[in-house]
Image (cartoon, rainbow, N blue to C red):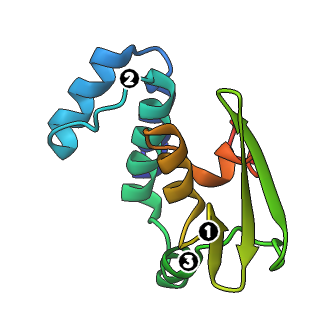
Amino acid sequence: MSRQAQAMEEVRALNALGLQSLREIWRARYGPPPPLRSPDLLRRILAWRVQAEVFGGLDAETQRALKSNTQPRGLAAGTRLVREWRGVRHEVEVADSGYIYDGERWTSLSEIARAITGTRWNGPRFFGLRSDDGK
């Protein structure tokens, strides 16, 4: 069996595993597992890593683009994002280089979402710019 076929078999096998088993696989391959409580999310991350080992990960250009891109594509300066959280309306303005929230300049929506909720969030998802399935 080729390495590619073996990796795909391994990824398929992850679907039948629960959180503890997924954590054990992570620990054996990569060290301490991330502190996730979602078996689905851990399964997806683990599947990506298994595939990246065989097929390759992100190319250098994509990595640079991800590191430098603080604004979701398609948001023009002046766009207003509104989210109600626990009965309070929060409004963010897209600026040329970042965002303005509560009179302050921020570099990422995730930082703003964390300030609002007190927990880590994917900023674009929090503000409704991404669906839960990542599309």
Residue 103 drawn at (x, y percent): 62, 68
Q: Can residue 14 be seen in this view?
A: yes
Please tell me how crowded label 2 is: few (under 14), some (14-19), or many (20+) other residues with Cα within 10 Å. few
Residue that numbered label 1 is attached to: 103
Q: Can residue 128 be seen in this view?
A: no
The residue under the point 84% across, 76% down is 78
The residue under the point 15% across, 42% down is 31
Can you say whether 48 is above or below 93 in the image? Answer: above
Callout 2: helix, strand or loop?
Answer: loop
Can you say whether 92 is above or below 38 in the image? Answer: below
The residue under the point 36% across, 57% down is 53
Callout 1: helix, strand or loop?
Answer: loop
Looking at the picture, which amino acid does disc 1 mark?
Gly
Please tell me how crowded label 3 is: few (under 14), some (14-19), or many (20+) other residues with Cα within 10 Å. few
* Quarter-of-image position of residue 88: top right
Can you say whether 51 is above or below 87 in the image? Answer: below
Q: Badges 3 and 2: C-beta atoms under 8 Å apart? A: no
Residue 94 drawn at (x, y percent): 74, 72
Q: Distance between the residues labelled 3 and 2?
A: 28 Å
Q: Which of 124 and 93 is in front in this view?
A: 93
> In the image, is 105 to the left or to the right of 130?
left
Looking at the picture, which amino acid does disc 3 mark?
Thr
Closer to the chain start, of discs 3 and 1, is 3
Residue that numbered label 3 is attached to: 62
Q: Badges 2 and 1: C-beta atoms under 8 Å apart? A: no
The disc placed on residue 37 is 2
Residue 102 drawn at (x, y percent): 62, 61
